[in-house]
Image: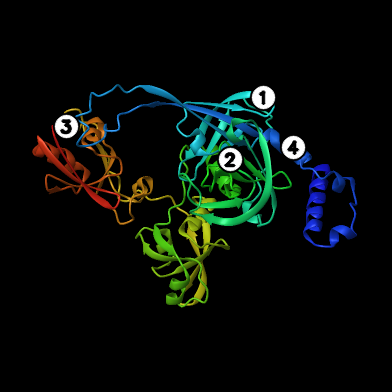
Amino acid sequence: MERRGNVRGLVILLLLWAVPGLSQERVPQSPAEISLTFAPLVREAAPAVVNIYASRVVQTRSPFQDDPIFGNFFRDFGQSRPRVQNSLGSGVILSADGIVVSNYHVVGQATEIRVVLNDRREYQAEVLLGDEESDLAILRLEDARDMPHLELRDSDTVEVGELVLAIGNPFGVGQTVSSGIVSGLARSGTATGNARGYFIQTDAPINPGNSGGALIDVNGQLIGVNTSILTRSGGSNGIGFAIPSALVAQFVAQARAGNTVFERPWAGVSGQPVDAGLSESLGLSLPGGVVLSQLHPLSPLAAAGLEVGDVITAVDGQPVNTPPEMIYRMSVRGIGADAELTRLRRGVEETVTVAMIAPPEDPPRAEVTLGTRSVLPGLTVATVNPALQSEFDLPMSAEGVVVLDPGPYGARAGLRPGDILRAINGVPVEATGDIDPVLRRAAPRIQIEAQRGSRNVFLRFRV
């Protein structure tokens, strides 16, 4: 109660200062208003925010190693040597048994993770679940019990203007607290790094090393995980981004369920934001929402009756204005649940129930790995389906045979995971079983035509 009284008193005084004349007419009414300090709040929340030291072993490589032309010339130039790469960041303890959330870019692919608490206790940690796209990772502290931890607040209840504190370990100087307000919501496509989706914006200073730290409200509840800043100088300019706690809660639930990879619902659609120009052509009074431009035949939205040209304005009553916002709202619901999508079609608004499903394995992968006697031993391919489209970020219209693992010789020839094989020496590749016999007939001079993203590549080599 003391902590909440102090913070409430601070809010009252801030409002008094903001309104001319009121500050001269009112005097502090309680000891809490006189003391004006965040100290009780920090004293309670800070022990749950930890410093994370992660290291991984990487191999130094020649810049020409994977080049299909120059790779052969520089094959024996320099030796590949292991090197230890260290990273520093922050994390937040979320449960008494030592569940910790941090950023993927802090602990992803780490071979050793050391977590240091505010009271200098140290624990080894392992990553239970990580996702590069969301830039979140869930860790468990080894042999941890009765840990100080923060409660999650539903981030959908957060409003612009709320007072917040950012707690982390900027620049490795030790735990630091900075204050500010929530300066924006529904920020999508603005964060740096690999994170994509929906963010809470704050002007509380966030600096390198704060990544994975806590953004808390005046009640000491976690509303977001600090992830990045928008800056031109490398320092904090008052525009920081935090991943909302609603998504963190879904990550924790999947980690406790035993998932090692985050599973987000599959929409099977592509769309674009409705801007002023598009809203006029669609006959809408105001811009807003996401207009569907393409639906996969297996899309759950198509199964629910949605069509190309429909405008999605809200998911579960929360407005969406960009495709990342829509995917975020679906991810928060989780696979196996239903989401209520608000659809606008020819001026008529309707709520549609859509099942949240994993990307289907239809058609079956028919995965094939070439043996040691093959032309490209170790090459692993599979039939493109929605699951692989999601895994490799392939176009929704992609079909055919995709490379899962190029193998040692395939990588040297220039193949990469996610390449879609189109033809070998002019012979079209239609199924995974075609690869080995076509390669044998084509040897020793081989030309592979593949689709890589939006462009076609041609790889020529001898075996």
Give the number of the disc on residue 374. Answer: 3
> CA gap, disc 2 to disc 3?
52 Å
Residue 293 left/right relative to 423: right
Circle 2 or circle 1, nearest the eye: 2
- Secondary element under disc 1, as helix, strand or loop, is loop
Q: Nearer the viewer, mark 3 or mark 1?
A: 1
Res 431 visible: yes
**Residue type indicated by callout 4:** Glu
Classify 59 as above or below 444: above
The numbered mark, 4 or 3, whose residue comes first in the sequence reads 4
Label 2 sits on residue: 207
The part of the image, by quadrant, that contains residue 252 is top right
Q: Earlier in the sequence, mark 2 or mark 1?
A: 1
Q: Which residue is mark 1?
A: 120
Mark 4–mark 2 Cα distance, whole angstroms, equals 23 Å
Q: Nearer the viewer, residue 427 or 191?
A: 191
214 vs 301, left or right, is right
